Amino acid sequence: PMITSLYGLTHQMVRDAGAGLAVNAKDVAAIAAGLQTLSSDAALRASMGGNGQRVFGRHTEDAFVSPMVKHLQAVLEGP
């Protein structure tokens, strides 16, 4: 699981995936509360961690970048 800030689109992706918590990055108490929540709830950590692996695991370099590079190389090399 992760704790992300409310800025940008990352927090929406993390929340939609159920993979972590989103807090105001300038709110130290909120960050501490998020850490406390995750550290005190093993089931929540396991659930969010599993969700993160399922959703974001497909966005690894091997899963995304390598096939894209191979495709672009094939296009540049031509028939």
Image: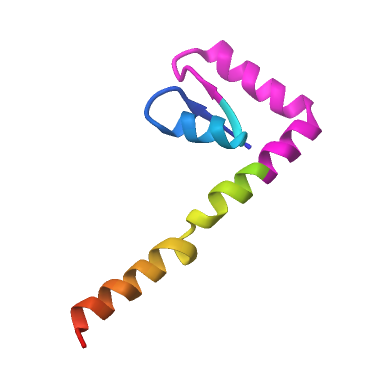
Q: Which percent across, then down, holds residue 6? A: 44, 22
Which of the 4 image quadrants contains residue 35? top right
44 relative to 15 in the view: left or right = right
Which residue is the extreme one toward the bottom? 79
44 in the magenta segment = yes
> Overall secondary structure of the magenta stretch?
helix
Image point (53%, 34%), residue name:
14
Q: Is residue 21 above or below residue 76?
A: above
Q: How many discs mark residues in the rendered view?
A: 0
Foreground of the two, 3 or 13: 13
Asked if residue 78 is among those painted magenta in the image, a careful observer would answer no
**Left or right: 28 as drawn, with respect to 37:** left
Image color mode:
rainbow
Picture quarter with the N terminus: top right
Q: Nearer the viewer, residue 41 or 74?
A: 74
Residue 74 occupies which quadrant of the picture?
A: bottom left
Magenta segment: 22-50
The residue sitting at 57% across, 19% down in the picture is 31
- Above-or-below relation of 64 to 73: above
Image x and y of residue 15, in percent:
55, 30
| Residue 38, position as x, y percentages in the image | 70, 28
Name which residue lies at 57% across and 11% down.
29
Query: Compared to 63, does 43 lie above or below?
Result: above
